[in-house]
Image (cartoon, rainbow, N blue to C red):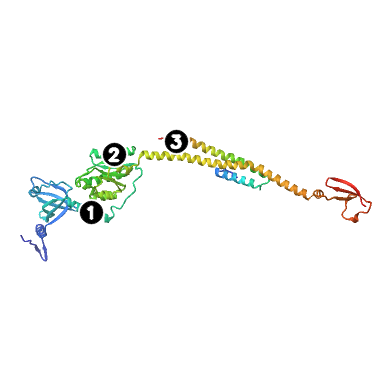
């Protein structure tokens, strides 16, 4: 967990690591809950980034459509 | 022949200027008559003069030779010579004594004939090829910022090139240099035009164009100076001279050759509609590609999330299963399981009976089996 906002790739990697750790059943019960919460947080962050990217793409595509030569 | 006499100053022999000139002039007269080839420049003919004067210039390096010819002899030749024309002059060297000027006294002049031109062209071609003048072939720009066009002032020929370029690429910017494209002065004029266009801002390619014409009409395009200028031009040159069968030397020196104005246009500008079409397709691909990237990432994140959702329950289930397992083993180890298999625990006064000697006949004992207890007496 870095102090600054992680990049999409960093967040995605951390999320996947958490899932793998949970699936292997290595974590203690309390830790599992903490990991789960962190995982949900990372998921929200990733989805937010993707939504923003998609919005931008659609916006550009629309603008491109309007300036078609 | 007068004798050239020196004045004696002691040991030193000194000649008067006139005597010296006369001496040299006489010596020169002993030289044979020869043919000399060159270009006519600075032709001066005056009806009141006895002689016609011109300078014969070497087109390769500009070396000059003054020539005089008797006016009546010149007129009789009916050559109608113009500056820049190539000729063979038959004559002998002489010194104009009054001025000490060296020159050639011409007896006859012949205009360079077709055969001479062909032979000279072939020689020049070999010489330039050996020097590597025809070797440089630079790629033409895909889309030049500006196009330089060297063309004659013949409206039809010029329009032909302009129209084909702009119909292919309407936004093309063309800088036109109108110049002489035939005759003895054309080569120099075209060199100048070429130099100006190549130096003009944003000109990325120059087209040297001329419509069809006779062999003589196209001679200027094989002029050594022009051919060298084309090869040395700082921007790529497209030679669009004459028709398919014409092979002026500038074609060889140019970076590309076009046999028609349409071919020249195809070389210097891309087809606008084709470029736009490609651009549109690329742009569409750009949006598709960007969407695909986001979709892939989203699928991966959603997949991870699904697994995350299931993971805590799974972890609890695992822990529960492990607990059950432990409980099972725990139970297996307790005496209850042994009792269920049909064993019994016998106690007397709350002490477990471990040996037959611990009880005697008539003792009261308590027997524990799997589902309860009952009393018994030892016999």
Find the distance from the CA under tag 1 to the CA under tag 2: 32 Å
Chain of the residue that carries numbered disc 2 in the rendered image: B
Q: Which residue is mark 2?
A: B162
**Mark 2 burial class by Cα count in 10 Å: few <14, some 14-19, many 20+:** some
Give me the residue at 42% from left, 39% from top: B281
Find the distance from the CA under tag 1 to the CA under tag 3: 57 Å
Q: What is the residue that sits farthest to the top in this orientation?
A: A66
Chain of the residue that carries numbered disc 1 in the rendered image: B
Q: Secondary structure at mark 2?
A: helix
Q: Nearer the viewer, residue B199 or B231?
A: B231
Q: Which residue is mark 3?
A: A64
Pick the quarter of the image with the N terminus of chain B: bottom left
Q: Is residue B308 left or right of residue B123?
A: right
Identify whether B67 is placed above or below B288. Answer: below
**Mark 1 burial class by Cα count in 10 Å: few <14, some 14-19, many 20+:** some
Q: Nearer the viewer, residue A18 or A6?
A: A18
Chain-order first, disc 1 or disc 2:
1
Where is residue B60 drawn, in percent x and y? 22, 53
Give me the residue at 56% from left, 39% from top: A47
């Amino acid at each position: 967990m870095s102090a600054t906002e992680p990049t999409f790739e960093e967040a995605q990697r951390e999320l996947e690591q958490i899932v793998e750790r949970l699936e292997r059943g290595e974590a203690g019960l309390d830790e599992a809950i903490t990991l789960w919460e962190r995982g949900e947080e990372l998921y929200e962050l990733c989805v937010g980034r993707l939504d923003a990217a998609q919005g931008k793409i659609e916006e550009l595509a629309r603008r491109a459509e309007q300036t078609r030569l | 022949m007068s004798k050239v006499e020196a004045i004696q100053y002691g040991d030193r022999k000194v000649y008067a200027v006139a005597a010296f000139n006369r001496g040299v002039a006489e010596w020169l007269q002993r030289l044979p008559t020869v043919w000399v080839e060159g270009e006519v420049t600075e032709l001066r003919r005056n009806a009141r003069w006895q002689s016609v004067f011109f300078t014969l210039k070497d087109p390769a390096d500009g070396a000059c030779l003054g020539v005089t010819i008797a006016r009546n002899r010149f007129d009789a030749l009916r050559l109608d010579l113009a500056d820049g024309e190539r000729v063979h002059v038959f004559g002998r060297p002489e010194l104009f004594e009054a001025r000490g000027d060296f020159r050639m006294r011409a007896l006859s002049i012949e205009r360079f004939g077709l055969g001479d031109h062909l032979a000279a062209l072939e020689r020049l071609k070999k010489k330039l090829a050996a020097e590597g003048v025809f070797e440089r072939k630079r790629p033409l720009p895909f889309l030049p910022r500006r196009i330089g066009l060297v063309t004659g002032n013949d409206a039809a020929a010029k329009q032909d090139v302009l129209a084909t370029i702009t119909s292919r690429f309407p936004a093309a910017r063309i800088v036109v240099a109108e110049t002489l494209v035939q005759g003895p002065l054309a080569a120099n004029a075209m060199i100048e035009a070429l130099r100006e266009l190549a130096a003009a801002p944003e000109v990325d390619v120059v087209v040297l164009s001329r419509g069809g014409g006779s062999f003589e009409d196209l001679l200027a395009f094989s002029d050594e100076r022009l051919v060298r200028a084309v090869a040395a031009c700082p921007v790529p040159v497209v030679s669009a001279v004459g028709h398919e069968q014409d092979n002026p030397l500038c074609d060889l020196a140019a970076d590309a050759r076009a046999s028609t104005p349409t071919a020249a246009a195809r070389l210097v500008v891309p087809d606008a509609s084709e470029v736009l079409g490609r651009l549109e397709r690329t742009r569409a691909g750009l949006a598709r590609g960007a969407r695909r990237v986001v979709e892939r990432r989203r699928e991966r994140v959603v997949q991870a999330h699904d697994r995350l959702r299931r993971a805590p329950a799974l972890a609890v289930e695992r822990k529960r299963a492990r607990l059950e397992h432990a409980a099972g083993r725990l139970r297996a180890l307790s005496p209850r399981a042994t009792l269920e298999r049909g064993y019994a625990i016998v106690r007397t006064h709350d002490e477990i009976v471990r040996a037959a000697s611990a009880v005697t006949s008539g003792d009261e004992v308590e027997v524990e089996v799997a589902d309860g207890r009952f009393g018994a007496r030892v016999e």
